[in-house]
Amino acid sequence: AGVLLTVAAAFVATLADPTDRRVLEARAAKAAKVAGGDQEKDGASLPSVGDLAFCGMCSEFVAPRSKHCRECNRCVDTFDHHCMWLNNCIGRRNYGAFLGSIYSVVLFVGTVLGTCGHLLVVYFSSDDEFFRRLQEAHAIRAVPPELVLAILVTLVSINLPLFLLDLNLIFLHAFLMSQRLTTHEYIMLKVGRRDRAQQAQRGEASGRIFTLPSWLDWIFFARCCRRRRGR
């Protein structure tokens, strides 16, 4: 079940198009005008922009929390981050599917760890009981017990770090939701607070938002540094 949930959530998050709908609608309207033979005049039929931001790369007005992703070359509505594992940007449209994928991963990996850990405890408590259980498992009855033990230790060694990292990621996104921030906004806020001049420009509003110690949110900044080195 954990595998199916992980695959389904990752599938939805990967295929979803997080592009700001304003960009899509504006491009569709321009394409319709060109197809109809209309010539678009500068300054004609401009929408009411209100608090919208303008993306110079898309040449369109976008939502205030949208950001242009250089990896995908598009403006993402309520941009959170670009996920290298899903090969897609995470934004308003697929953030729920992204959360579902990391929750299902921790469920699946936790089940594997729990099963392997239980069998290892049985082995170290009573190797006779361990061997007896192996004999009851028809699928692996012919497998040497030493090989089974080596596989269990290997699975725990691989999955334990993955479980802890994914658990940390779940905690961080739960924290971000409590602060009503995206990953990108949190990074910009914390980097800005390191500069007193930028902190002063933010005013009292930034003082009401909490940030975490570096040993808890390092995974956000490690991802940013890796992307910078790759450019």
Image: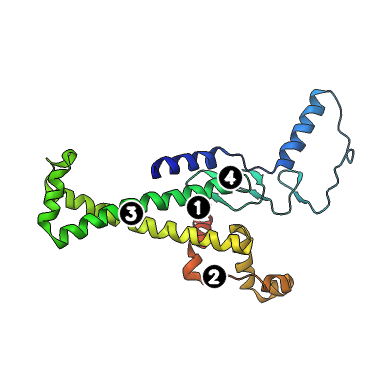
* Tag shown at residue 230: 1
User: CB atoms at circles 2 and 1 under 8 Å apart?
Assistant: no
Q: Which amino acid lies under the numbered mark 3 shown in the image of this protein?
A: Asn
Which of the two labelled residues, at mark 4 and mark 2, occupies the earlier sequence position? 4
Residue 221 appears left or right of 197 = left
Q: Mark 3 points at which residue?
A: 159
Q: Please determine whether, in this image, residue 19 is positioned above or below residue 152.
A: above
Q: Please determine whether, in this image, residue 204 is positioned above or below residue 173.
A: below
Q: Please determine whether, in this image, residue 131 is positioned above or below residue 12.
A: below
Residue 87 shows in the view: yes
Which of the two labelled residues, at mark 2 and mark 1, occupies the earlier sequence position? 2
**What residue lies at 52% left-to-right and 62% top-to-bottom?**
172
Q: Nearer the viewer, mark 1 or mark 3?
A: 3
Give the CA distance from mark 1 to mark 3: 27 Å
Give the CA distance from mark 3 to mark 2: 26 Å
SS at circle 3: helix
Q: Residues within 10 Å of mark 3 (few under 14, many from 20)?
A: some
Between residue 221 and residue 204, name the one nearer to us.
204
Q: In the rendering, at what x and y percent does residue 3 appear?
A: 39, 42
Q: Mark 2 points at which residue?
A: 212
Q: Mark 4 points at which residue?
A: 94
Residue 125 appears left or right of 205 = left
Which of the two labelled residues, at mark 1 and mark 3, occupies the earlier sequence position? 3
Give the CA distance from mark 2 to mark 1: 26 Å
Q: Residues within 10 Å of mark 4 (few under 14, many from 20)?
A: many
